[in-house]
Amino acid sequence: MDLVPADHFTYEELTDAYNQTRVDYLVPMPMNVARLKEYTRVYDVDLQGSCVAMHDNDMLGLGMLGVRRNRSWITRLGVLPSGRRHGTATAIMETLIQQARQRQLDQVWLEVIQGNTPAHTLFCKMGFRETRELIVARRPPSPDSSNGYADQVQKVTALGHDEAIALLAGRQHQANWLNETETMRNVRNLSALVVEFTNGRKGWVTYHASILQLTRIIVEVEHGDLTDTTAAILSVLHERYQHQDAKTENLPDDAQWQGFVQVGYFDSFRRIEMVKNLTE
Ligand SMILES: CC(C)(COP(=O)(O)OP(=O)(O)OC[C@H]1O[C@@H](n2cnc3c(N)ncnc32)[C@H](O)[C@@H]1OP(=O)(O)O)[C@@H](O)C(=O)NCCC(=O)NCCS
């Protein structure tokens, strides 16, 4: 088996290999070339540090490495079903970790979908430890989204991308690779609403809006009860975007999540976040 840097392949070849590794995946996530390009850009994937396992001219599997400041992130790991349990994923993981070490990075992060026992077992074996459980949530569109909060709203200030990034940079909650400020900077056209309520509660929401969907929703409460104020801020957002369904990734299961639940979000699936320290 040869482990070849992913930048030796075209995006077409990488997309095809990735899709073949995921034919039997827990949550279907088919890729196309445009989406893989966008994914590598938004999540700072370093294709030179990423690798493809080859046997002669056949691709056996692949794994990708995101790199930011002192941290790295492993993603898109997969082995074709016909070649599993022969140590291919272990060899890919070792190469990716070695690449992170060569770049003198302190940590490697990753997420694994809850219930993916093969991958979870592999990561534990390789010295990754669990940090927290994260929720991927969705909400269908709803014509009446005010949830009774409409008369409590005092002021709503709509902001553009740069101001949304400034809000995110000052956030208190610990973010994950998918929703941290470095990711959001790479996403085009984020928006934000800063919402003040008559009873002194205050906070903001940042999001990406398209004709069909709201994504990348992050809420921060500055004053007021975390659950209730989150629900109130989200109600203002969904009043404005009544026809879009909403999707947001990697929220911790905490009091703020209960605010999302109050306005109709449901838990689509969960991921386990894991980390390996390279400095020990
Ligand atoms: C998870 C995956 C990458 C493992 O690839 P692989 O090449 O078969 O893994 P390896 O042969 O290197 O296995 C290493 C160890 O992982 C664990 N493991 C792998 N597959 C397993 C399974 N089906 N059940 C339980 N443990 C498993 C074992 O401990 C194994 O060691 P062993 O074979 O000596 O018992 C592969 O199953 C896959 O591509 N799955 C679909 C995509 C996916 O889940 N990607 C990960 C997303 S986070």
Image (cartoon, rainbow, N blue to C red):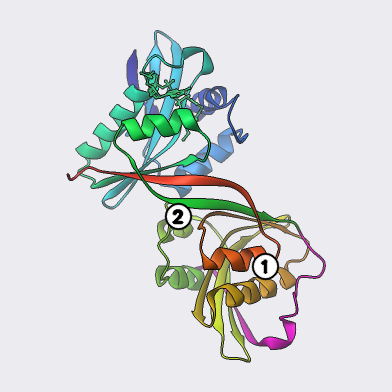
Q: Residues within 10 Å of mark 1 (few under 14, many from 20)?
A: some
**C-beta proximity under 8 Å, tags 1 and 2:** no
Q: Which residue is drawn at 59% across and 65% down?
A: 258
Identify the element where label 1 is drawn. Answer: helix
Q: Split into 4 quadrants, where in the image is the N terminus?
A: top left
Q: Is residue 21 visible?
A: yes
> Measured from the top left, where is residue 127 in percent x and y?
29, 36
Asked if residue 145 is among those painted magenta in the image, a careful observer would answer yes
* Tag 2: amino acid: Thr
Mark closer to the observer (1, 2): 1
> Measured from the top left, where is residue 37 in percent x and y?
51, 39
Magenta part of the protein: which range? Answer: 141-161
Please identify the quarter of the rendering in which residue 31 is found.
Answer: top right
- Disc 1 target residue: 262
> Measured from the top left, where is residue 93 in percent x and y?
34, 29
Q: Is residue 241 shown left or right of residue 274?
A: right
Mark nearer the N terminus (1 vs 2) = 2
Q: How crowded is mark 2: few (under 14 residues within 10 Å), some or many (20 or more)?
A: some
- Disc 2 target residue: 183
Q: Is residue 50 visible?
A: no
Q: Does mark 2 have its CB less than 8 Å from ligand 1?
A: no
* Tag 1: amino acid: Gln
Quadrant holding ligand 1?
A: top left
